[in-house]
């Protein structure tokens, strides 16, 4: 029989089994796996279970029962929906949202479903100092993702609350971590100490040029558009780490590790270099021809989730049209698209648009990768928050063994 205690309503084993729709023996199997917590009653006659914990497990079980068949990778999420020609953050058109609100406000929307006008992220002094010391110790040739990975690890060690996985604590860590990552990168231009906007802080890490309002607006738009994009490889890595209850810093580290793969994070710098080459040679045709001759795909084109132009690229191109210094790089990008249209009609993706921004604003080739990593950190945190609400270690696929059948002789 259920009873009421100071800790909330308790259920007997039989009651818990009825709520879960399983046999009593399965209830104890949940306990042994760490999915339920039991407590002996005062008389020692049996176990009781927290009703809220049992009901939460029942909800998770119902969600998993409705999931696709085994072998089809699918993760339930309320964050991003991608359609053939557009995408949405929590049901709101993402391009419209990012065009109206700053990166920090879009991040808050993704995290909480609540708009926070004027949101600011601030790096605590102790986290920033630890991250900068660690990054400064790296070799000079270190890439941006190298620096960000080291900065995340150092910031984690400096945060004694990192193991608190409550939503409030994780969000607090996220609001500190993002500006810490930006602040730990070496500055190549004049700083903006009096402004808390991530776009302004990041600008001085990307280019020595003085920013103007229009250029900053494009950078901020890029950050907001790149906050999340469903289950990219890096995001899946984050969810696997969060499924094992890794703290948010470790989950972000997993995302950065996957981002370093040449098939995920390197596309931006390849598109940058291609645009520079097009501008140097005075046309896209010879550059495209050389890529095809070498058996390489032309960077910045095509996206398997969109049948036409990547909506993020379209939004950035439209904003870049108002940036006078972007005209040559923008024309080069469009010429690349026009030349390759005869080869199958691939459309521009966000990497090509980021390359126009980086080339036209005097940024290094890896700038697009840096923008992507900083922006996507917010999305990784959002996915970690979702995964913390699911059954622990649920992302544990079974391997299909193809080795020699046992028993084999001892080597």
Image (cartoon, grey):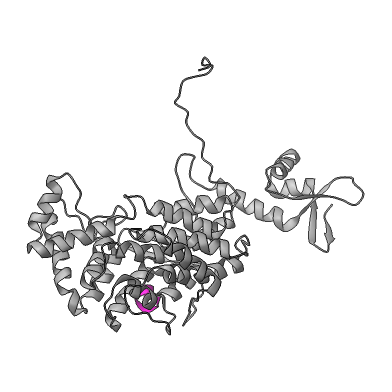
Q: Nearer the viewer, residue 65 or 127?
A: 127
Height in image: 285 above or below 185? above
- Side of 345 relative to 363 (left or right): left
In this view, the residue farthest toward the top is 409
Q: Nearer the viewer, residue 5 or 142?
A: 142
Residue at coordinates 65% horizontally, 51% vertically from top-left? 58
- Side of 343 relative to 410 (left or right): left
Q: Quadrant of residue 277?
A: bottom left
Whole-percent x, y for residue 206 in the image: 31, 70
Residue at coordinates 37% horizontally, 65% vertically from top-left? 226
Height in image: 351 above or below 203? above
Residue 9 visible here: yes
In this view, the residue farthest toward the bottom is 194
Whole-percent x, y for residue 198 in the image: 41, 75
Q: Is residue 97 magenta?
A: yes
Whole-percent x, y for residue 193 in the image: 42, 82
Height in image: 377 above or below 28? below
Extent of the magenta region:
96-102
Q: Is residue 131 magenta?
A: no
Height in image: 373 above or below 36? below
Residue at coordinates 62% horizontally, 60% vertically from top-left? 163
Residue 231 visible here: no
Marker count (numbered): 0
In this view, the residue farthest toward the right is 43
Q: Nearer the viewer, residue 341 or 272?
A: 272
Whole-percent x, y for residue 147 in the image: 41, 61
């Amino acid at each position: 029989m259920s009873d009421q205690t100071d800790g909330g309503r308790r259920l007997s084993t039989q009651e818990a089994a009825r709520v879960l729709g399983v046999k009593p023996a399965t209830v104890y199997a949940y306990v042994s796996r760490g999915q339920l917590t039991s407590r002996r009653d005062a008389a020692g006659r049996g176990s009781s279970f927290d009703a809220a914990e049992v009901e939460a497990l029942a909800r998770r079980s119902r969600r998993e029962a409705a999931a696709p068949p085994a072998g089809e990778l699918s993760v339930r999420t309320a964050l991003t929906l991608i359609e053939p020609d557009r995408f949405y953050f929590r049901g709101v058109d993402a391009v419209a949202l990012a065009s109206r609100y700053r990166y920090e406000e879009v991040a808050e929307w993704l995290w909480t479903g609540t708009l926070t006008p004027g949101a600011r992220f601030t790096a605590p002094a102790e986290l920033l100092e630890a991250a900068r010391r660690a990054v400064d110790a790296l070799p000079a040739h270190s890439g941006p993702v190298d620096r960000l990975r080291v900065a995340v690890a150092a910031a984690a060690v400096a945060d004694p609350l990192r193991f608190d996985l409550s939503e409030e604590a994780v969000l607090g860590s996220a609001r500190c971590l993002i500006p810490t990552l930006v602040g730990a990168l070496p500055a190549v231009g004049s700083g903006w100490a009096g402004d808390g906007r991530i776009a302004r802080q990041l600008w001085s890490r990307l280019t020595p040029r003085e920013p103007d309002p229009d250029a900053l607006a494009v950078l901020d738009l890029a950050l907001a558009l790149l906050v999340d994009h469903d289950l990219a490889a890096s995001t899946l890595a984050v969810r696997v780490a969060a499924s094992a209850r890794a703290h948010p810093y470790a989950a972000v580290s997993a995302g950065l590790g996957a981002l370093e793969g040449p098939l995920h994070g390197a596309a931006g710098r390849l598109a940058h270099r291609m645009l520079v080459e097009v501008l140097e040679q005075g046309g896209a045709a010879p550059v495209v021809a050389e890529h095809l001759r070498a058996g390489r795909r032309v960077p910045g084109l095509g996206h398997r989730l969109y049948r036409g132009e990547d909506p993020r690229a379209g939004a950035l191109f439209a904003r870049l049209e108002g940036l006078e210094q972007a005209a040559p790089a923008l024309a080069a990008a469009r010429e690349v698209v026009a030349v390759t249209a005869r080869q199958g009609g691939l459309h521009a993706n966000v990497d090509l648009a980021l390359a126009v921004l980086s080339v036209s604003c005097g940024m290094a080739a890896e700038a697009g990768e840096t923008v992507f990593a900083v922006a996507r950190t917010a999305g990784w945190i959002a996915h970690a928050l979702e995964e913390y609400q699911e059954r622990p270690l649920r992302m544990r696929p079974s391997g299909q063994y193809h080795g020699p059948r046992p028993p084999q002789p001892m080597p």
